[in-house]
Image (cartoon, grey):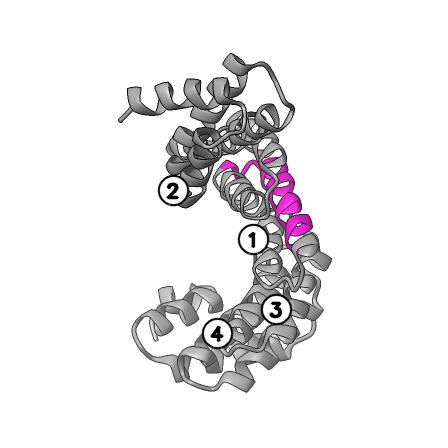
Amino acid sequence: MTSSELETPPLDTARRLAEGGDLDGAAAILRRLVADPDEPDRAQAAVGLAVVLEERGDVEAARAAARTALATNHPEYAAQAACHLAQGFEREGRTEQARAAWQAVLGVGAPAYLPHAHLALARLAETLGEAEKELREATSSGAAAGDEQVAALAARELADLLLEHGEPGAAADVLIEALGIAPESEVPGLRVRLGIAHLELACAEFAEAVESGADVPTSALAIELLARTLPLRGRTEDADQVWSYGLGHADEALATEVRLRYERGS
């Protein structure tokens, strides 16, 4: 062994061995570091050992190493270890264990890892309320950590969730706020979703105008706008029903006005 190799930090040597395919050699070095409770790099070594052992196919030993790193409560490597555990459990479909590991990430409190943990917990949520809460936390923690990309992703997923469950106003609020912090690459997608939210809001207003018993010109206009907007949201059958409602209305003046509007657009 050369003098330069003797001077190389053990972690660097282990990394070089692992990258070169010598997983056993890397694991041996990392185990020695992890075994020393006074080793300053113990937390980092334990995370490295977890990765090496998993690559070697020793999943349970890898998890034991990750738990060792987590127990150090190191702000960086404990969070990495918890993420390692959570991702492994998710791959195996072990939802409860994955959820507990992501909660452990939150417990470490490292700002850079919080939005990812909240996103994962939203993905694993069992209720709409839980998913919404986690996505809101992911958005705010991403913004606080300066990770605008993740914050925008969380806002987009939250908006989709709210739209899916009939809350376009809340979705629009989320999207407008997200546009203020989103990186340029995310802006077009957020704007499209904001447009969709506005279409849903418009449909609700047009329907309310129809149901409110407005004067003939206003009612006919509302029926036309609603019938022509609904297909943009993939609701062609609903649009046909709106046209049928207007064309067959008991108020002959309204039916005539709707017919003129219908034929004008045909």
Mark 3: which secondary structure?
helix
Residue 124 quadrant? bottom right
In the picture of the structure, the residue carrying the numbered disc 1 is 116
Residue 130 seen in this snapshot: yes
In the picture of the structure, the residue carrying the numbered disc 2 is 236
Rounded to the nearest angstrom, the CA distance separating label 1 from label 4 is 16 Å
In the picture of the structure, the residue carrying the numbered disc 3 is 42
Mark 2: which secondary structure?
helix
Residue 38: percent from the left, percent from the top?
69, 70
Residue 149: percent from the left, percent from the top?
47, 40
Residue 152: percent from the left, percent from the top?
51, 38
- In the displayed structure, 139 sits above or below 114; it is above
Amino acid tagged 4:
Arg
Residue 266 vs residue 17: left or right?
left
Rounded to the nearest angstrom, the CA distance separating label 1 from label 3 is 25 Å
Q: Residue, x 53% and y 20% (percent of image)?
A: 219
Rounded to the nearest angstrom, the CA distance separating label 3 from label 4 is 27 Å
Camera-nearest label, 1 or 2: 2
Task: Confirm or deny contact between disc 3 and disc 4 (CB under 8 A).
Answer: no
Badge 1 or badge 3: first in the primary sequence: 3
Q: Quadrant of the N terminus?
A: bottom left
